[in-house]
Image (cartoon, rainbow, N blue to C red):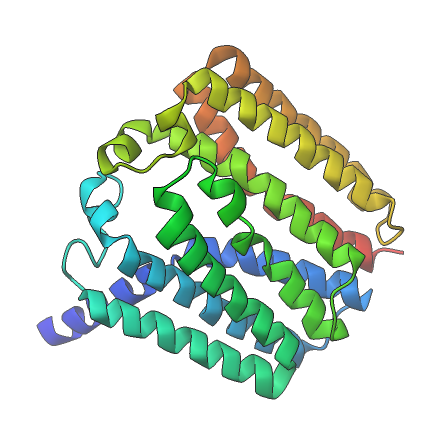
């Protein structure tokens, strides 16, 4: 019984390395892009391949992030109990695990989807690991702005999987996630300001005031809302998407405005949690909009 429990705990730790909740959110955006690209329900086999390989690539990138950030994670209360800093999984095991997941993802994409989707997916991993984690995260408060591009890639992967290329609507989907990322992460960083300061990570709330961070969150939320509305002008979306974008964006702006006025932990927490609902909802609206005449 103890052996079974130990094996289960080890598997659970490896799953934790992949950050499954983040992966799930990324897969939602890739799937929505596939529906929009196909203008209907994509083939089931293609969806399974893209979601499976996409989960491997994103999970592998997160495992590599665990490996590279193990020194930072040890110093932060929120992350010190993760598998690597707590020594439940060795650093080199996490490194090999992350590399293997990405190689497997590239193999699946290249053999059964198309090479472009594989190159984009693994390219996102390299950008996330080498540009964001190794360089930007430790050197500039704009880390999440530039590095967030890696998290905006899944719609490009989904679009390329269906069409074999990347066109303007896919770039709009990329832009939506790109502008969504700063409000999402800066709201969390406001809540974890002391943690990031202790670890020496120059997140925006660490190097500037909470008031300035709240102002930046509001500005990026405004840009995000504008991009979601401009996307409708491409002619690829209908009234369901536009109505959803307006309503969801209005609530996001209201919460960001409340944070700007209050500069409170309650406001930051509301923006952070709503941002996850927002991204899932707006991409879900894309799927419904595609399926409803």
Task: Report x, y in % for residue 143.
Answer: 45, 42
Left/right placement of residue 185 relative to residue 233 reads left
Q: Image height check: is 190 above or below 8?
A: above
Q: Image height check: is 83 above or below 195?
A: below
Name the residue: 78% across, 62% down.
167
Name the residue: 41% across, 18% down.
209
Name the residue: 48% across, 12% down.
262
Q: Which of 284 and 50 is in front in this view?
A: 50
Q: Is residue 241 visible?
A: yes
Q: Can residue 244 be seen in this view?
A: no
Task: Report x, y in % for residue 83.
Answer: 22, 58
Task: Report x, y in % for residue 59.
Answer: 42, 65
Left/right placement of residue 96 relative to residue 39 reads left
Task: Report x, y in % for residue 93.
Answer: 23, 71
Left/right placement of residue 103 relative to residue 117 reads left
Outermost residue on the bottom side: it is 111
Q: Image height check: is 122 above or below 29?
A: below
Quarter holding the N terminus? bottom left
Report the number of discs.
0
Q: Nearer the viewer, residue 258 or 111?
A: 111
Quarter holding the C terminus? bottom right
Left/right placement of residue 274 relative to residue 88 reads right
Outermost residue on the top side: it is 261
Name the residue: 74% across, 65% down.
166
Q: Which of 57 and 138 is in front in this view?
A: 138
């Amino acid at each position: 019984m103890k052996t079974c429990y130990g094996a289960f705990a080890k598997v659970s730790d490896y799953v934790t390395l992949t950050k499954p909740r983040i992966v799930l959110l990324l897969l939602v955006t890739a799937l929505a892009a596939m529906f929009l690209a196909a203008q209907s329900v994509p083939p089931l086999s293609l969806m399974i391949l893209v979601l499976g390989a996409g989960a491997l690539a994103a999970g592998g990138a997160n495992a590599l992030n665990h490996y590279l950030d193990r020194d930072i994670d040890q110093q932060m209360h929120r992350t010190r109990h993760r598998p690597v800093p707590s020594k439940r999984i060795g650093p080199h095991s996490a490194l090999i695990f992350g590399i293997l997941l990405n190689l497997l993802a590239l193999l699946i994409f290249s053999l059964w989807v198309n090479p472009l989707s594989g190159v984009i997916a693994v390219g996102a991993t390299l950008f996330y690991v080498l540009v964001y984690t190794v360089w930007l995260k430790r050197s500039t408060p704009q880390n999440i702005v530039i590095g967030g591009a890696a998290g905006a890639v899944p719609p490009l992967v989904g679009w390329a999987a269906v069409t074999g290329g990347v066109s303007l609507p896919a770039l709009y989907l990329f832009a939506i996630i790109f502008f969504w990322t700063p409000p999402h992460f800066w709201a969390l960083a406001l809540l974890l300001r002391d943690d990031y300061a202790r670890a020496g990570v120059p997140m925006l709330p660490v190097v500037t005031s909470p008031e300035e961070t709240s102002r930046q969150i509001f500005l990026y939320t405004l840009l995000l809302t504008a991009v979601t509305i401009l996307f409708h002008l491409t002619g690829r979306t209908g009234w369901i998407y536009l109505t959803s974008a307006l309503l969801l964006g209005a609530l996001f702006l209201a919460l960001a405005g409340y944070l700007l006025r209050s500069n409170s932990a309650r406001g930051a927490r509301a923006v952070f949690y709503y941002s996850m609902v927002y991204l899932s909802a707006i991409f879900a609206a894309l799927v419904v909009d595609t399926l409803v005449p």
